[in-house]
Amino acid sequence: MSDYDRQIVLDTETTGLEHRQGHRIIEIGCVELINRKLTGNNYHVYLNPDREIDQGAIEVHGITNEFLADKPRFLDVYQRMMDYLSGAELIIHNAAFDVGFLDAELEKISGYTTKINDVCGVHDTLIQARKMFPGQRNDLDSLCRRYEINNSHRELHGALLDAEILADVYLIMTGGQTALTLEASSGSGQDRAGKNGDVDFSTLPLVDVKPSDDELKSHQAWLERLNEKVDGNCVWSKLNAKESNGKPSTTEAAPDATTLH
């Protein structure tokens, strides 16, 4: 889990692949998450790059020079953008690409020395996906198929659209179900549900189910595999270590199943 309460899922579209060759950003799309909830406080802008867009890039995102002719320059929007991003953790797929382009744009501003990493944390979901699914395709479309996220409306790349899709992917990658709501079908259901259908779990009866020895062994084996995938940062494995007199081992007996669910 992230140490940041506020996260910004970010994507850009550009005139070409290499900022070192003078290519520029033409679209920035950002989606805000606070405590893993979409807020609707998004940021989106198209930019006039003052240069031609590569034909190959147009085929990817469909943005043309004619469309951008009356749009603002990066110089016109950078301060508002940086204020919006400041203090957040950026969630980016292939972060080196987008951060490299953003820093290159900031470097063009006379007297401005701040870089993206000076004001934001950065989490790269491509690096995370490669650790979770080694040897597999981990582009955004492949992750959508893997997690059964519908991206059929994504005929072309777009910064805001891709940021919205990546937000869904990231939330599933890092926690699965992010909110539990129930359709209240009776009066008692209505009593238990708060506004927006959120369930008040304090009103629900607690069912105490004890796992069998085989289930505990199977669960422990799953924890060990998970711990390897997340570089030793599995929360439940750390809990095991604390409950085992401080012994830093993930092979100690698993906590009672009622403490895990």
Image (tube, helix red, strand yellow):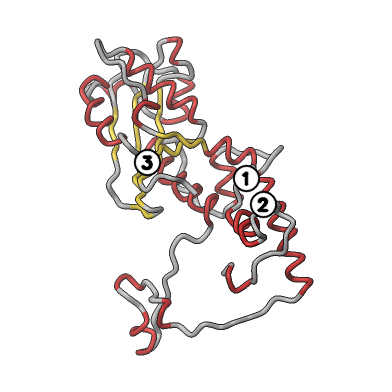
- Could you classify mark 2 by the number of other residues whose Cα lies within 10 Å: few (under 14), some (14-19), or many (20 or more)? some
| Callout 3–callout 1 Cβ contact below 8 Å | no
Q: Which residue is mark 2?
A: 226
**Identity of the residue furthest to the front in this view:** 245
- Could you classify mark 1 by the number of other residues whose Cα lies within 10 Å: few (under 14), some (14-19), or many (20 or more)? few
Mark 2 vs mark 3, foreground winner is 2
Q: Of helix, strand and loop, which one carries label 2?
A: helix
Q: Of helix, strand and loop, which one carries label 3?
A: strand
Instruction: Give the image location of residue 260, x and y in percent.
Output: 59, 67
Kind of residue at badge 1: Val
**Identity of the residue furthest to the bottom in this view:** 187
Kind of residue at badge 2: Leu
| Callout 1–callout 2 Cβ contact below 8 Å | yes
User: Which residue is depicted at the point 43% across and 15% down?
Assistant: 19
Which sits in the foreground, 200 or 160? 200
Q: Which residue is mark 3?
A: 8
Instruction: Give the image location of residue 101, x and y in percent.
Output: 41, 21
The answer to which of marks 3 and 1 sits earlier in the sequence is: 3
Give me the disc on residue 38: none
- Could you classify mark 3 by the number of other residues whose Cα lies within 10 Å: few (under 14), some (14-19), or many (20 or more)? many
Q: CA distance from mark 1 to mark 2?
A: 6 Å
Give me the disc on residue 230: 1
Which sits in the foreground, 259 or 10? 259
Q: Image quarter for residue 181?
A: bottom left
Does residue 244 sit above or below 116 in this rendering? below
Kind of residue at badge 3: Ile
How many marks are shown on the rendered structure? Answer: 3
Judge left or right: residue 132 versus residue 217: left
| Callout 2–callout 3 Cβ contact below 8 Å | no
Judge left or right: residue 142 versus residue 50: right
User: Which residue is depicted at the point 63% across and 62% down?
Assistant: 243
Q: CA distance from mark 2 to mark 3?
A: 26 Å
